[in-house]
Each structure stands twice: as C-alpha cells, then as structure tokens.
Amino acid sequence: MDAVEEIVIVGAGISGLTTALGLHRLGLRSLVLESSHSLRVTGFAFITWTNAWRALDAIGVGDYLRQHHNQLYGLQSTSAVSGLQTSEISFKDKGKNGEHDVRCLQRKVLLEALLKELPDGTIRYSSKVVSVEESGYLKLVHLADGSILKTKVLIGCDGVNSMVAKWLGLKKPAFTRRYAFRAYAYFKSGHGFEPKFLQFNGKGVRCGFIPCDDKTVYWFMAFTPSSQEKQMENDPAKMKQFALSNLGNVPDQVKAVVESTEMDSFSLAQLRFRYPWELLWGNISKDNVCVAGDALHPMTPDLGQGACSALEDCVVLARCLAEALSKKPKNKAKEKEEEEEEFKRIKMGLEQYAKERRYRGIDLITSSYLVGFMQQSDGKVLNFIRDKISALLAGVPLKKADFDCGKLSMS
C-alpha cells in the first residue's frame, strides 16, 4: 500500500505553522506543503492582541516572543482633520479574562520561532497544490509537479485565495474597494515613540503607527483609491508620496516615520473579506477537510484580528483533532472497519472545531467591517459622528481581544 500522510496542511504561513506546532505538541505528526521555495516572511508585522498571546502561550512560544517585542499600554486616536485627540484607551485595565497584553509582533520572528520548534522535515517547499480528489476515506492531494499525496486529514491554511476553501464550496472573498499600505521604518538611534498605538482618522483615510521595539515602527494606511492611484502597486516612490500627502494634520514625529521608510519596505494590498453569512451557511469543514486562518475568515484589518483569530483557530483545531484521534476503539476490528471508524472520528473532531469557530469568525468579520466603515468615513456629517463616537470605536478592538480560546491540552 502506498504511504499515507496522517495530516496534510496546505500553506506554511502563520496558521499553517501554528497548527502544525499545536499538533506536534499533542503528539501528532503533520506535513506542511508550501508553494514557495522558502519560508515566506513578507508582511513585516501585525498588532498582537491579548487573545493572540493566550494562543501563543498555549502552544509554548509566547514567552520567547515577548522578549523581542515591547508591550503597548494604550491606543490614542486623533482626528487627521483637526489634529485634536478624540479618544484614548488604556491597555492596563483588566478584562473579563485577565490582564491585557498588546504588542506589535514581527511576522518573521514569529514564523522562525514556530519553525524552530517543529521537527525537521515538517515543511515541504516548492509544493503547490493544484487540486484535491476523494478516494474512499482518504483525500488525494495533487501537486503542480505531478506528484500525488494521500492523506487522512487535509487542512487548508492557504490564505485568502485558498484552493481548499474553494473545494469546500466557499466563495472567493469580496473586494471592499479599499486598499492598504503596510510598511516599517528603522531608526538606528531609536525612534522615541511612547509604547502606544497611535491612530489617525479623517478624509477617507485611516492610518496607524505602532512601535515594535525601541528602533522599529510598523505603520499602515487604509484608503479608497481613485483609478489613477491604483497604479501605485509597483511604484514605491508613488506610494510614499501618496502616504505623505494624505497623512493630514499629524505630528512631525509621525511624518518622520513615513519619510524614513525605505522604498523596499512598502507593500500595497487590496482589502478583502468573506461575507459573514457564508460562514453561517457554508462549509468550514466537510468530512476530513477543513480550513483555518485567512482561508476561513478573511477580514478587513480594522480590528487587527486577522492573524490573531488565526492563532485562535490553530489552538482549537489542534485540540479538537487530537481529541478525536485519541478515542481509539476498544475492540479490535477489521482494517476496513478501522478506517471507517477513524474517518468518522476525524469528521466529528473537525465538526466540533467548526462549531467552536463559526460564530467567533462571523462576529470578527462583521465588527471589523463596521468599525472600518466608520473610521475611514469622509464628509462633514460622517466625520462629526465618527469623532463623537471615537471612544466607543477605539474600545471595540480591546473588547474583541478579551477572549480565551482555551488551552492546547485535551480535556
């Protein structure tokens, strides 16, 4: 009989590697297929809220990552029109689930930390999945090089354009008509920013500036472009000029971050999201196949929960799958009966994962879209309303981050 992989994960990004490590901690081997020839470390950084740190602690890498990233103590929102502060939220107050922990986490540091904890040979690079086929209780994973892998469990962690999500019947994520710059600036002698998340809203633009450590500041700018501005994608000089001209009324220290950003540090992306009702009615899992991370719940970045909720997915998925596979039948059965029994247990485990994650995904997708709509609004009336309710809007990310996905260990 041809070799059969126990668990195949598509995509070696944040959700793929975290799921693999969670399974490894619980004694389950997995194979991660990555289409690139090496680890993908683009994207630089993302704000990591309390819920994400609980997930990182659950898989055993939280303490290591904290050593490399400064803790943030608040979020300050300012009108980019008037230059006046509209609200300030403290991260020092306790939430329902305990102390808050908010930092700006460098993606490369996270991925390398996850990789270091995984057994050698977990990732197979240059392995692009082109299709999936059913074969009894197994899935046949067809790769671009013509090879075929057999697996008992298939997990799609392959991003917003997920092939596995497509196989499950989920539609392509919708385009919001918004774009976002993501970039970072390095200050050799230190940046001088307080450990705060600075946010500016106004004239159809939302931007944020977040220190990762004493020398690096991550920043972003979300906006709705004109037809001419869509041509900036391959021209970092135009991106930088656009960002500088659309900052609005911000402090010189903030402008200096954009001015100090190197051209190769810019990236421009379309903002996409999955309609929440697709998670309500669609297949998060089907038989022995499921999706996690951006493949499951692509959302706008307005709550900073895309990667954070992906980390939650991974802990829950590893726990549910390990619980299912640990329930071995007491009586010895024939090989075919054993395969059927194992298939049923895997299916039930993935269904439990989908049950736990469905409404959390719906909540975050919806809340993120609505917060982004208000914060990036334009026009006198909408600007006035936004500034009046800015404290309420600023508090939503902290409230949504006050969530605990639970321990990795099985109950």
Image (cartoon, rainbow, N blue to C red):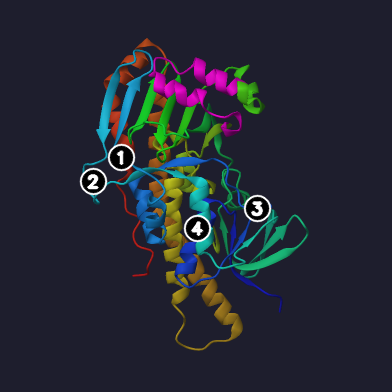
Residue nearest the viewer, comparing 192 with 104:
192
* Tag 1 and tag 2, C-beta contact below 8 Å: yes
Nearer the observer: mark 4 or 2; the answer is 4
The amino acid sitting under disc 4 is Leu
Q: Could you say which is closer to the camera, residue 157 or residue 353?
A: 157
The crowd level at tag 3 (other Cα within 10 Å; few <14, some 14-19, many 20+) is: few
Residue 247 colored magenta?
A: yes
Q: CA distance from mark 1 to mark 2?
A: 9 Å
Which x, y percent locates residue 64? 41, 56
| Earlier sequence position, callout 1 versus callout 2 | 2
**Residue 240 image offset from top left, x and y in percent:** 56, 22
- Against 356, residue 225 (above or below) is above
Q: Which residues are magenta?
A: 238-266
Which marked residue is nearer to the observer: mark 1 or mark 3?
3
Instruction: From the viewer's side, name the closer residue of 205 and 154.
Output: 205
Mark closest to the chain's N terminus, 2 or 3? 3
The answer to if 318 sits in the magenta stretch is: no
Pick whichever of labels 4 and 3 is earlier in the sequence. 3
Q: Residue tagged by mark 3? A: 38
Per the image, the residue denoted by label 2 is: 95
Whole-percent x, y for residue 203 in the image: 43, 15
- What distance separates the C-alpha of mark 4 from that of mark 3? 14 Å
Direction top: furthest residue: 380
Q: Label 3 amino acid? A: Ser
Q: CA distance from mark 2 to mark 3?
A: 39 Å
Check disc 4 and report the residue beneath it. 114
Magenta: predominant secondary structure element? helix
Q: Secondary structure at mark 1?
A: helix
Q: Tell me the quadrant of the picture where the C terminus can be found.
A: bottom left
Q: Could you tell me which residue is drawn at 65 percent across and 70 percent down?
A: 136
Q: Is residue 91 above or below residue 347?
A: above
